[in-house]
Each structure stands twice: as C-alpha cells, then as structure tokens.
Image (spheres, rainbow, N blue to C red):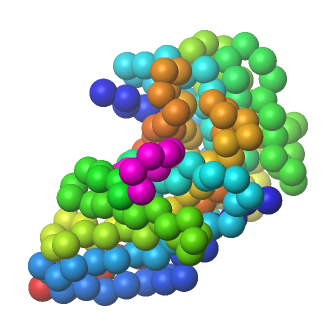
Amino acid sequence: AQSVTQPDIHITVSEGASLELRCNYSYGATPYLFWYVQSPGQGLQLLLKYFSGDTLVQGIKGFEAEFKRSQSSFNLRKPSVHWSDAAEYFCAVGDESNFGNEKLTFGTGTRLTIIP
Amino acid sequence: GAVVSQHPSWVICKSGTSVKIECRSLDFQATTMFWYRQFPKQSLMLMATSNEGSKATYEQGVEKDKFLINHASLTLSTLTVTSAHPEDSSFYICSARHRLKNIQYFGAGTRLSVL
C-alpha cells in the first residue's frame, strides 16, 4: 500500500527566508505526486504536481518541488517566503494502477508559521 | 477555472437528524468525486469515491448506510450523514476530478457539529 510521510509537523520560518518542506513516499511503481496547501477552515489548493518527465516541477505562488526517485522524496521549496504562505501543507501520492480514478493518500501535513 | 463549490460551509444539527452536504463542480465536468473526512490537526482520510451514475465505493471501515453518497450528474455529488451523532462531528471535504485532467480540485469543506 502507498504511504506518505511528512516528518516535520510544524516549521517556523522568518519572512523572506527560504523554505523546504520534506515529503517521503512509499509506492511500488512510478508515483503521481502532489503538494496541496490548506488555509485554516478551507479546502485544499493544488500547488504543483509530478506525473513524469522533468523531475523539477514548478508550481503556483513561487513554489517548486523536486522528485528524487533514489530517495523516494518530493520536497517542496520556496526561495523566499511571504507572510501569506502561513498554512498547512500536504503532500499526496496517487495510485497510478487505477489511472483516472486514482485515490490520493495524504501525509499528515506540515504547519508553516511565518515570523516577521 | 476549476472551481468546486461545497455547501453548506458549516452546519449544526441535533443528534439523530440527517444532514446533506452538496459538492458541485462549477465550471467543469467531473466523472469522479471523492469525499474526505478531516479531524482537527490531522490529515484527510478518504471516505468514498463516487462515479457519476453508479454506486459509490467506500473505504474500509466507512459505514455506507450512515454516509449516503449520490452522484447524479457530472457536476453534483451529495453526502448525507444519516442519524448523525456527536462522533460524526468533523470537517468533510469533497474533491472533483476534472474529466479532462488528472487533477482533483477541492471544495472549501463543511464543518459538521452534532449536538
């Protein structure tokens, strides 16, 4: 069964500093990988996704993520965070064996706090 | 584009009553919709997958008679929590998979409080 691990429950970063959120996955084949962001009391917004091809993926709001098969990782990065980036971030893996109706398995999330 | 509307955003009900939550894809067709449950400060747990015109597929441990799902059209799925009890209080989130893309778009969620 697929699984996702986000080792950091809570991260605090100064505004303007760089950010990296870790995500490790367990999956037997090539995974479909996603990063979502959730503001308090809201649904999830897709930041970026990886299906195949270039392992460095660009997303919205200046985020990027790199797929590293050898490390089973899909870490999210941003060179300079803004106060509006404070939110909960979820990494997810999709089951390609049922392409088109794949279920997403989510990590437990990382809460990002931005300090002035 | 790709907006998913979920209604209501917050509902309070008495124990024993039923509550219906709607999930609509506003500007795209969704052959598949998903229903998730999220407990405070925890991740999303998939409850069921619904395909337009067919019965929903429930995840292990989810009571299909308590959580009734109907996906009558390409833009609407409903989740009915029947005979709700306080332990059903949670944040319920739906998502809709764009028919032409392999991406799930999420609604803003419904907070259910059962008294």
Residue at left offset 38%, top offset 67%: A76
Image check: B86 left or right of A48? Answer: right
Residue situated in front as seen by the camera: A96 or B82: A96
Residue situated in front as seen by the camera: A87 or A18: A18
Residue at left offset 48%, top offset 28%: B101
User: Would you say residue A50 sits in the magenta stretch?
Assistant: yes
| Residue A62 position by quadrant | bottom left
* Total numbered labels placed on residues in the image: 0
Q: Position of residue A1 (x, y in %)?
A: 79, 59
Q: Is residue B49 above or below residue A15?
A: above
For the N terminus of chain B, the quadrant is top left
Q: Position of residue B55 (x, y in %)?
A: 81, 23
Q: Is residue A39 above or below residue B78?
A: below
Q: Position of residue B42 (x, y in %)?
A: 58, 69
Which stretch did the figure color magenta? A47-55
| Residue A69 position by quadrant | bottom right
Residue at left offset 65%, top offset 56%: A105
- Can residue B15 be seen here? The reply is no
For the C terminus of chain B, the quadrant is bottom right
Q: Position of residue B105 (x, y in %)?
A: 46, 38
Q: Is residue A18 above or below residue A35?
A: below
Image check: A86 left or right of B31? Answer: left
Residue at left offset 73%, top offset 47%: B47
- Can residue A31 be seen here? The reply is yes
